[in-house]
Every structure is written in C-alpha cells, then in structure tokens.
Amino acid sequence: MKVLKNAIIVTMNTNLDIIKNGYIIINDNGDIEEIKEGNYSGENAKDMKGDLLIPGLINGHTHTAMTLLRGYADDLPLIEWLEKHIWPKEGEWMNEKNVNLGTELGIMEMLACGTTSFCDGYFFTSSTVGLADKIGIRGLMAEGLIDFPTPNKKTPEEAFDYIKDTLNISNNKISRIVLYVHAPYTTSPLWIEKVSHLAKENDLLFVIHTAETLFEVSEIKKRYGKTPVEHCASLIPVETKTAMAHMVHLNDKDMDIAADRDFGVIHNPQSNLKLSSGIAEIAKMRKKGINVSIGTDGAASNNNLDIIEEMRTASLIGKYDDPQHLSAIETMKMATIEGAKVLHIDDETGSLEKGKSADIVRISLNGIESYPYFGNPYSFIVYAMNSRDVKMTMIKGNVLYENGEYSTIDADRVKSEVRKLQ
C-alpha cells in the first residue's frame, strides 16, 4: 500500500470534485483504494506538501519515435513536408533499433510533462509495445499501414499480415495494441475497410488521420465524391471503436456523422498551426456531443510532446470567436477523462476515483507562475503553468518520473545514443 497525503486533489470525476486537503490510498495492485479529505494519520505516507494531484494526462495522438526527426524539416506545408523530407528520411533512418530509441526518448519527454497514457501510430509495433510496457507507461501502440513501402514493410499486404500477428501480443498488460491506417488520401478503401473490420472483430481501437487539410478534402471528393468523414464512415463498420486525428475541415454533416457514429476526435492544435493545416472547430464539435481528446502529433511537426503546452494552445485558439469557448475546465477534460473516452480507456484512467489505476501527476505550487494562486487549479494548469512544474508522474501506482529522474529508463544512455545518430 502507498499513500499520498497533504495534497489538493483534482479528481476530474463526474462531479468534478476538488479536495482542498486530502490523501489518496493506493493498493498493491496499483489502483486507487480510497480518496479522502483531511489529514492522514498513518505511517509511511508521501507528503505532497500542499501541491496539486491531478489524473495522468493523455496524449491522444502522436508518433513517438519521430522525436528523432525533431527540427529536421520545419516551416513547410504538410504535403511538401511529408513527401520531400519526412518520408525519405524515415526510409533512411527508421530501422527497428532507431524506432525503439526514438520511442524511448519520446516516452521520457512525455513522462516529464505528466503524460501517463498515449496513442502512438508508427512502425515496428511488436517491439515498441514491449518497450512501453517494460517502462510502465500506458501506450496504445499501432503499426502504420499505408499504400506504399514503410520502414517496416514493403507492401500494405505485408503490413496487414504483420498487424494480424501483433494481435497475438497479450493485451493484459498496461501497454497494448490498437490498429491504425494513415489517411484516406494515402490508404486505399480496401485497406481502410480491412483494418477497421479487423479492429471491430477484435474489439480494438481503430485510428486514422481524417480531414487534416483542404488538399485532402479536395482529393477525396475528386476520387470518391464524398468528404473524408463520409468516405471513412462508409468503410468502417458500425460500432467500431474509432478515433480520428485532426478533423480540421468538417462541414455540419460531417460533424453529425461523427456524433452519430461515436467517432472520437483527437485535436492536434500546434501541429495543425505549424503546418498551416487550419483550426478545428472543437467547441462546435463538443456541443454536438463528440468526444474530443488532445494530442501533440509527432515531434517532427510540433516540435515537442508537451501536452500541457498543447492544452493552452487548444484553449486559446478555440476562443477566436468567443472567450467562453474551450474554458480551462473543458480543456482539462479533453486532456484527462474525455481523452480517455476517445481512446476507450476511461474504465482504467482519466480521473482520480476509487477502483481506477493510480495514474497521478504531482504539480508544484512553488513555481514563480503559481504566485498568487487563487484556488482555481484548472485556470492555473491550462493558462499559467508548464511542464517544469511537473514534479512526479505515477502510473499504476509506480513513480516513473520524479524531480528530473526516471526509475525505469537510463536517461543518460538514451541521450548518448541519440547524439551518436547525428
């Protein structure tokens, strides 16, 4: 049993309860046994010294190993960035060893930013899912399928066989397999249909980039006479657990389809801004009942994996037409419990409640930007703080990051190996 005491506890539960001074008891399985207000009188409790405890943050969409391409190609539109720079460099660099190294580097960054769960789409997934599980982070790992060669497989047929083989990897671990195809403009209807049907058959999450750019919307209308959302909806089986990344360029019908089909949306505001893809109408989507998560996308287009910074950007650009849109509390929901719903892991994480995994982040109230503190943790976290205020990241009751140190990663080794690549 572990106990965290003397904390302001931001639960993100249904009632959005905030415990102004309380403690959390964690059982030997790594789950929350009890959350109570007041002082804890037992022994061997870890004193939080009045700091904030929040649910672990959720990075709804990223390509973790692309930390190795951070800063490689900047200030370019998406298609030129992908076709002339990123895809050729991936073909040159991204073997299994380097993908594992970049994934480990990305996980280090996410832990330091308070991220405890992330959804990853990349390559060599049968290897990276084991790495994430060994580290102890909740990684939802997906092998990318696309119509042309990838660093892992030469054809989509080979990639599909590889994906089927990954289904044999046990999903009883903290990290697990999900399924993913790149996008409707790079992946034929056959493969969108086959992979999404495989997801439905195995009750797994299906992920796809959708409606990211005006180019994509134009191209899909030209090819199929539909919007990207209409096109995907015609191929994905009903009741498939589906998360669509970006969803920048939607009309009202697209949003109605997404709401009706329970397509979760992953908002990647900084990547979309940097690549001039546009600004998604998140407030409008949420008003229609669409669940929205926040993601960083990969570090090659962001250029970091800081979900706290992403929250601030998401809220601020969401206010372009109304200052009440994407309030601090609504943005916090997207990075915690609503993000968990998009990834279909809300029975495990996303809020601090009895029976859920002890995925807990400690945020210091001693940073310069925390003075004065008027008692609104949502406002403080979303608008004022940044990742340097994260002092501890715990997943399933295990402290993986604390005060700049990692318990399951040799940070010096990882940084040294990355330097050797340059």
Image (cartoon, rainbow, N blue to C red):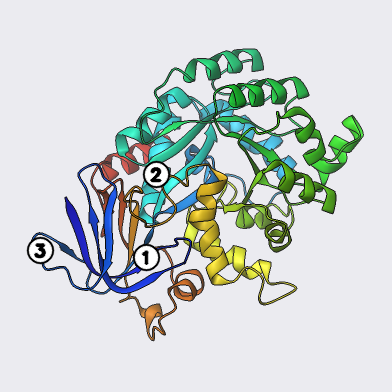
Give the mark nearest the N terminus, 3 or 1: 3
Provide the secondary structure element on which disc 3 rests: loop
Q: Amino acid at mark 3?
A: Gly
Q: Nearer the viewer, mark 3 or mark 2?
A: 3
Provide the secondary structure element on which disc 1 rests: helix
Q: Is residue 364 left or right of residue 380?
A: left
Q: Residue at x 61, y 26 (%)?
A: 200
Q: Separation of disc 3 and disc 1 at Cα? A: 31 Å
Image x and y of residue 247, in percent: 71, 48
Dot 3 crowding, Cα within 10 Å, few <14, some 14–19, many 20+:
few
Q: Amino acid at mark 2?
A: Ile
Numbered tag placed on residue 42 in the rendering: 3
Image x and y of residue 309, in percent: 51, 63
Disc 1 designates what residue?
Answer: 388
Q: Are marks 3 and 1 in contact (CB under 8 Å)?
A: no
Q: Nearer the viewer, residue 348 or 98?
A: 348
Q: Residue at x 26, y 57 (%)?
A: 34
Disc 2 designates what residue?
Answer: 107
